[in-house]
Image (tube, rainbow, N blue to C red):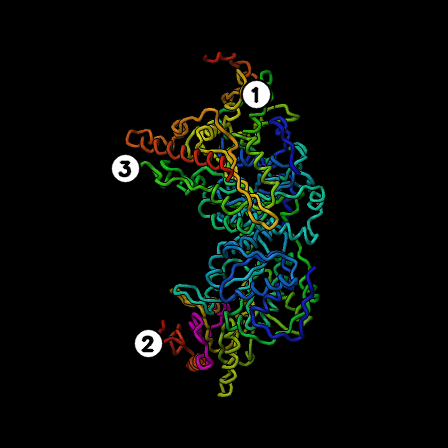
């Protein structure tokens, strides 16, 4: 029996330590992982918990991220709780198996510490890895600070393992700015966390030798479409469970989570949409803009997948101008969030000015001044009733202004 | 629990846990190997399979040919899949949370045997990293390579197991080429050098040797590698009914020697003894040419300009046979 | 919720399932009810699920079929052990016959049969087995 870890009411943890404690409290049966900056401390911390008797399960340090996710898939199909952590190139190497995990409907938890994708090689935070996996059929939860990384990792187990969901869940946090920044975190005590998450409920377990089951079949044109449709349906409908788990978590901790995160949006004329730690920076920028008389607000996603299409249209539908911040090289089009948010607004008959900002690639510092500059673009465009700047701009970049459209 | 199999009649009392009406080619060796492996034990078996012929022909929705739990994830990860199922089993056993039927078997001394099946593409090539990692970590499972020396499932491309002179769709014989240029990779020794407790090479035609080795493999704790010769009617291009004969030609020419390597460890895990045993010696060692002649994938080698490759083959096989005998004699 | 494939008895019930009726993750089951010790249960007593390939047939792949002659058989079980398709039915160490639903007609059983004349021979698929038996060859003189 694993030892109880004595926790203070308030701990000072960075995002990696917060995620590691959540994995420990979930008493994961198989944690198969491979180290990669900046998520490495998650598995290092976890290994130490194991070495000190705080974990009953097994930690398997595999030889690659591909094997880490493959191991999670096999363990989950065997009917045990499985989790891992990764970033960037490791995430990219996992991609093949991410699709297997969701297609086989295995409630694996993956803590992703977001980092840029090479080339050129870069160890710092941006959202390239998050965007790479966004169509992989996983539930994607987004945190902005260590407390949320902890909370959402605990909730990830409960959401994914729900019998109406049975899907894998990623929990994102920003590399370094969240993962390596120590902040106050209020944890649950071990027994409360265990009670909240509940026992793992095996479904079609390979270890039950009296009920042989075949996992990972071949489906061709006569079946594949129906299976992918079923998977999409269940992912879309996981919203109900996500909301239920958010509510139960709020009842226990007082910390409230919604599909969409908003800051001062009730009367906002202009809004920044961002993900990750930029959300908190944007709040400071919004406050400073409000001192200048500009009604600025901030919007983010708590749940990237399933995408809260209606909620996004609702919170952004009535502002005059929106700056969508995409922290990933857009690769020949607009940023992914710009496209998705624009689609949600257009489909709901809303037509605010929507501008796209590519920023912070490879960990480039995201300053309050930069975000205030975005708000100023938005305020001018709002006043003019149309974009007075190019639709896509790179900000915080050296050299001549880079903009399109 | 070791199943008693004194002779073939006794073996025939086995109840297959691999089912008919799968979609494997008529005369396929893979099936014969899978049967022999599964029937070598009456303990529960859990199988992981790499992408390949065996996978695409035995689990095509909505049909499964498996009466044991089975998983396929991808081409390159059968080893880690089996290894992690094994780890999951051990965690659940330790926690006392095995499903009741499984716990009952364990209480009777019949622990589940966890087996990975993969082709040579999934083993020698794309799955090699996963295989090497799983063996280094020492998981308790058996890995069986169904070695047909070619990517048969995708239409006969060369792998690093394809032997020299074979014509494949990516190393075709032509007016200026005798086909595959490289010698076959020595997978058995590579896996033995991982320190695995038991490694063996088998042929389905020598069923008793195969079953005995599989049983030995099930009895040791740790990763076990079995390299199984799998004559492929489609890509070796012999008639389906000749599968066993071609396999025998391979064994009797010493192209496919049957042997085992046992690494014994002390209580600290240090290997104190490595022994190589040749488990089958042909009464008459037949010329390699007879083995090659039985397979149209080598037909072009019999043209005058390619005869030197047949000579090379014989030299390579003789040298290898000599090497194995020397190792056996030396007890290393 | 998806229909439980384990409860479906007839394959025709699953061939037209819509997306909403599928088991999440495309899992397939071997049996319709738990089988505690599969290795101890012969195929004729197993509760095969319609999703088990055992319930299907591939006999139409054949051009020629193996015909079995009980009178000549010595029950050596070579045909049983080398059959790739679990199509030689042996019980209590005796060869009983060929499972034509699963036999693909590869002919290995005939090749490995050691009796003289052989106890298994290939005949055209359309020929009646009794007719085949009536045409069975005589013992071959071995070349010295």
Q: x%, y% of residue C13?
A: 61, 41
Real-space CA distance between mark 3 and mark 1, rounded to the nearest whole angstrom: 49 Å
* Mark 2: few/some/many CA within 10 Å (<14, 14-19, 20+): few
Disc 2 marks which residue?
Answer: A400
Disc 1 marks which residue?
Answer: C68
SS type, badge 2: loop
Callout 1: residue from which chain?
C
**Residue B300 in the figure: left or right of residue B228:** left
Q: x%, y% of residue B287?
A: 40, 27
Real-space CA distance between mark 2 and mark 1, rounded to the nearest whole angstrom: 85 Å
Q: Nearer the viewer, mark 3 or mark 2?
A: 3
Residue at the extreme front of the image, as rendered: B330
Q: x%, y% of residue C71?
A: 60, 16
Whether discs 3 and 1 lie on one chain: the answer is: no
Task: Please report contact status of discs 3 and 2: CB closer than 8 Å, yes or no.
Answer: no
Instruction: Inspect this view and state whether residue B47 appears.
Output: yes
SS type, badge 1: strand
Q: Nearer the viewer, mark 3 or mark 1?
A: 3
Q: Which mark is residue B12?
A: none
Disc 3 marks which residue?
Answer: B176
> Where's the N terminus of chain B, which quadrant?
top right
Callout 2: residue from which chain?
A
Q: Is residue A270 magenta?
A: no
Span shown in magenta: A344-371
């Amino acid at each position: 029996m694993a030892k109880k870890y004595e926790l203070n009411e308030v701990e000072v943890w960075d995002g990696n330590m917060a995620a590691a404690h959540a994995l420990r409290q979930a008493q994961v049966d198989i944690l198969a992982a491979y180290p990669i900056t900046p998520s490495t401390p998650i598995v290092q911390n976890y290994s130490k918990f194991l070495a000190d008797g705080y974990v009953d399960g097994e930690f398997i340090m595999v030889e690659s991220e591909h094997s880490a996710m493959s191991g999670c898939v096999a363990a989950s199909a065997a009917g045990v709780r499985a989790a891992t952590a990764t970033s960037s190139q490791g995430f990219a190497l996992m991609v093949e198996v991410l699709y297997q995990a969701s297609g086989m409907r295995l409630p694996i938890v993956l803590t992703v510490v977001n980092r840029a994708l090479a080339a050129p090689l870069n160890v710092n935070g941006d959202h390239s890895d998050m965007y790479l996996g966004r169509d992989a059929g996983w539930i994607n939860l987004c945190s902005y600070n260590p407390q949320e990384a902890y909370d959402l990792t605990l909730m990830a187990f409960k959401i994914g393992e729900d019998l109406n969901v049975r899907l894998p869940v990623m929990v994102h946090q920003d590399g370094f700015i969240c993962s390596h920044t120590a902040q106050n975190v209020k944890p649950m005590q071990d027994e409360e966390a265990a009670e909240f998450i509940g026992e793992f409920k095996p479904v079609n377990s390979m270890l039950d030798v009296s009920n042989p089951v075949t996992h990972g079949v071949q489906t061709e044109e006569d079946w594949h479409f129906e299976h992918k449709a079923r998977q999409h349906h269940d992912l879309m409908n996981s919203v109900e469970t996500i909301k239920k788990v958010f509510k139960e978590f709020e009842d226990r901790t007082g910390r409230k989570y919604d599909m969409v995160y908003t800051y001062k949006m009730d009367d906002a004329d202009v809004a920044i949409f961002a993900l990750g730690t930029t959300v908190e920076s944007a709040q400071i920028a919004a406050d400073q803009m409000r001192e200048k008389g500009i009604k600025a607000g901030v919007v983010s996603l708590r749940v990237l997948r399933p995408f809260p299409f209606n909620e996004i249209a609702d919170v952004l539908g009535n502002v005059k101008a929106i700056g969508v911040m995409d922290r990933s090289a857009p690769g020949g089009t607009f940023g992914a969030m710009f496209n998705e948010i624009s689609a949600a607004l257009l489909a709901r008959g809303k037509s605010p000015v929507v501008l796209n900002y590519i920023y912070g690639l490879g960990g480039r510092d995201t300053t309050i001044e930069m975000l205030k500059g975005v708000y100023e673009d938005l305020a001018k465009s709002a006043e003019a009733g149309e974009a007075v700047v190019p639709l896509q701009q790179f900000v915080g970049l050296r050299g001549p202004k880079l903009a399109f459209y | 629990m070791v199943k008693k199999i004194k002779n073939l009649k006794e073996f025939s009392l086995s109840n297959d846990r691999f089912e008919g009406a799968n979609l494997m080619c008529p005369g396929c060796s893979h099936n014969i190997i899978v049967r022999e492996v599964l029937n070598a034990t009456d303990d529960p078996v859990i199988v992981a399979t790499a992408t390949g012929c065996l996978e695409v022909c035995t689990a095509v929705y909505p049909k499964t040919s498996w009466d044991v739990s089975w998983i396929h994830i991808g081409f390159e990860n059968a080893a880690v899949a089996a290894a992690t199922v094994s780890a999951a089993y051990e965690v659940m056993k330790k926690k006392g949370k095995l499903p009741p039927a499984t716990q009952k078997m364990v209480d009777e001394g019949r622990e589940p045997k966890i087996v990975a099946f993969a082709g040579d593409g999934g083993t020698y090539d794309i799955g090699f990293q996963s295989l090497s990692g799983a063996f280094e970590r020492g998981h308790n499972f058996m890995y069986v390579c169904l070695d047909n020396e070619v990517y048969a499932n995708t239409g006969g491309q060369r792998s690093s197991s394809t032997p020299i002179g074979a014509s494949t769709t990516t190393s075709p014989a032509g007016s200026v080429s005798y086909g595959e240029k490289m010698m076959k990779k020595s997978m058995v020794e590579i896996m033995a050098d991982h320190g695995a407790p038991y490694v063996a090479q088998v042929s389905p035609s020598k069923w008793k040797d195969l079953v005995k080795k599989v049983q030995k493999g099930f009895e040791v704790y740790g990763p076990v590698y079995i390299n199984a010769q799998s004559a492929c009617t489609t890509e070796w291009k012999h008639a389906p009914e000749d599968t066993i004969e071609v396999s025998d030609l391979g064994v009797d020419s010493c192209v496919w020697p049957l042997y085992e390597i046992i690494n014994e460890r002390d209580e600290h895990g240090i290997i104190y003894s490595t022994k190589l045993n040749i488990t089958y010696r042909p009464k008459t060692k037949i010329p390699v040419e007879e083995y090659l002649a039985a397979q149209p994938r080598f037909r072009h080698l019999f043209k005058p300009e390619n005869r030197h490759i047949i000579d090379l083959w014989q030299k390579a096989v003789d040298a290898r046979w000599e090497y194995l005998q020397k190792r056996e004699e030396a007890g290393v | 919720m998806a229909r439980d494939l384990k409860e479906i008895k007839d394959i025709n019930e699953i061939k037209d399932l819509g997306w909403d009726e599928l088991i999440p993750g495309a899992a397939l089951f071997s049996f319709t009810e738990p089988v505690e010790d599969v290795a101890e249960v012969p195929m004729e007593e197993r509760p095969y699920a319609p999703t088990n390939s055992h319930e299907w047939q591939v006999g139409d792949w054949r051009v020629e079929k193996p015909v079995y002659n009980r009178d000549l058989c010595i029950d050596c079980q070579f045909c049983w052990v080398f059959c790739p398709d679990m199509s030689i039915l042996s019980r209590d160490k005796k060869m009983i016959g060929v499972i034509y639903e699963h036999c693909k007609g590869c002919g290995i059983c005939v090749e490995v049969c050691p009796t003289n004349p052989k106890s298994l021979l290939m005949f055209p698929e359309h020929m009646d087995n009794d007719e085949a038996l009536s045409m069975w060859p005589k013992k071959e003189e071995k070349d010295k």
